[in-house]
């Protein structure tokens, strides 16, 4: 079963939107999929840095 997803509304700068469109097309992903991927990677990076700090 696919994980549940929620719709959200956000406001982005136009230059960010255009760049995400380009990057998502290069990876054959939808705009939404690409944003989700980027956010997951960012969260993982933050969590890993926090774990390293507290070792």
Image (tube, rainbow, N blue to C red):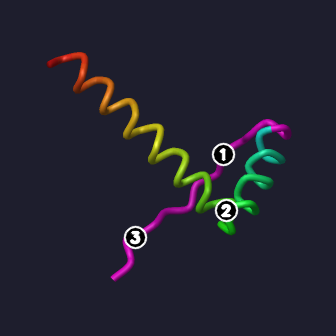
Identify the residue position indicated by label 1 in the image: 10
Of the numbered discs 3 and 2, the one sitting upstream in the chain is 3
The disc, 2 or 1, on the residue closer to the chain's N-terminal end is: 1
Which element carries disc 3, helix, strand or loop?
loop
Q: Provide the residue span drawn in magenta.
A: 1-15
- Under circle 2, the secondary element is loop
Image position of 50 (left or right of 8): left
Determine the residue positioned at 69% across, 68% down. Answer: 28
Q: Tell me the quarter of the picture where residue 30 sits.
A: bottom right
Pointer 1 or 3: first along the chain: 3
What whole-number distance in Å separates the C-alpha atoms at marks 2 and 1?
A: 22 Å
Q: Is residue 13 magenta?
A: yes
Residue at screen point 77% across, 39% down:
16
When asked about the image quadrant of residue 53, the answer is: top left
Report the quarter where the C terminus lies. top left
Does dot 1 land on a helix, a strand or a loop? loop
Vertical comparison of 24 with 4: above or below: above
Relative to 42, is 40 above or below? below
Q: Nearer the observer, disc 2 or disc 1?
A: 2
Q: CA distance from mark 1 to mark 3?
A: 19 Å
Across and down, in percent, residue 8 comes to 58, 55
The picture places residue 7, in percent across and down from the top left corner, at 56, 61
Q: Which residue is mark 2?
A: 27
Percent of width and height locating residue 11? 72, 41
What number is the disc on residue 29?
none
């Amino acid at each position: 079963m696919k994980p549940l997803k929620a719709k959200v509304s956000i406001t982005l700068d136009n230059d960010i939107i255009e760049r995400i469109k380009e990057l998502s097309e290069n990876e054959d992903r939808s705009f939404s999929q690409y944003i989700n991927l980027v956010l997951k990677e960012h969260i993982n990076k933050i969590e890993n840095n926090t774990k390293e700090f507290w070792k």
